[in-house]
Image (cartoon, rainbow, N blue to C red):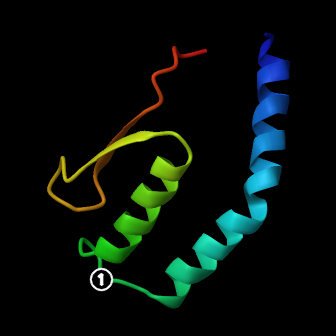
Amino acid sequence: MTHLEQLSEILVSLDAMLTELEAIYKDIHAHPELSMQETRTAGIAANHLKANGFEVTADIGKTESSVYCATGMAPP
């Protein structure tokens, strides 16, 4: 697959997720959290990533918003 084909595939996927991503953005914006205390936001992000096939390891850094994500796929 060429880079252009990969990009096209990514854009189609993002377009399909636009409504959900906008809802997540609005939810996070409606519930602000203090810097370095973004526990709710981190949970929302982790749950979204898990729901989309990522393996998520949380709490790896000094903040709850630090995560390691893996898909098991080789890099392009």
Q: Position of residue 19 (x, y in %)?
A: 76, 67
Q: Quadrant of residue 64?
A: bottom left
User: Which of 65/19 is in front?
Assistant: 19
Left of 52 or right of it: where is 20? Answer: right
In the image, residue 8 above or below residue 25: above
Residue situated furthest bottom in the rendering? 30
Residue 42 as seen in the image, left or right of residue 11: left
Give the image location of residue 37, x and y in percent.
24, 75
Q: Quadrant of the C terminus?
A: top right
Horizontal arrangement in the rendering, residue 70 relative to residue 28 (left or right):
left
The residue under the point 28% across, 52% down is 66
Asked whether the viewer can see residue 38, the reply is: no
Total marks drawn?
Answer: 1
Q: Is residue 29 above or below residue 49?
A: below
Q: Residues within 10 Å of mark 1 (few under 14, many from 20)?
A: few
Q: In the displayed structure, would residue 50 be above or below residue 29? A: above
Q: Quadrant of the N terminus?
A: top right
Relative image position of residue 71 (x, y in whole percent) = 48, 29
> Residue placed at 19% from the left, 53% from the top?
59
Q: Nearer the viewer, residue 54 or 6?
A: 54
Is residue 65 among the parts visible in the rendering? yes
Q: Name the spot of residue 6 as percent of width and height, x first.
A: 77, 23
Q: Residue at the far top: name it.
A: 1
Question: Regarding mark 1 in the picture, which secondary structure is present there?
Answer: loop
Q: Residue at x 52, y 51 (%)?
A: 51
Taking 54 as reference, is 23 left or right?
right
The residue where tag 1 is placed is 34
Identify the residue shown where x is 66% and y is 75%: 23
Please state which amino acid type lies under the numbered disc 1.
Leu
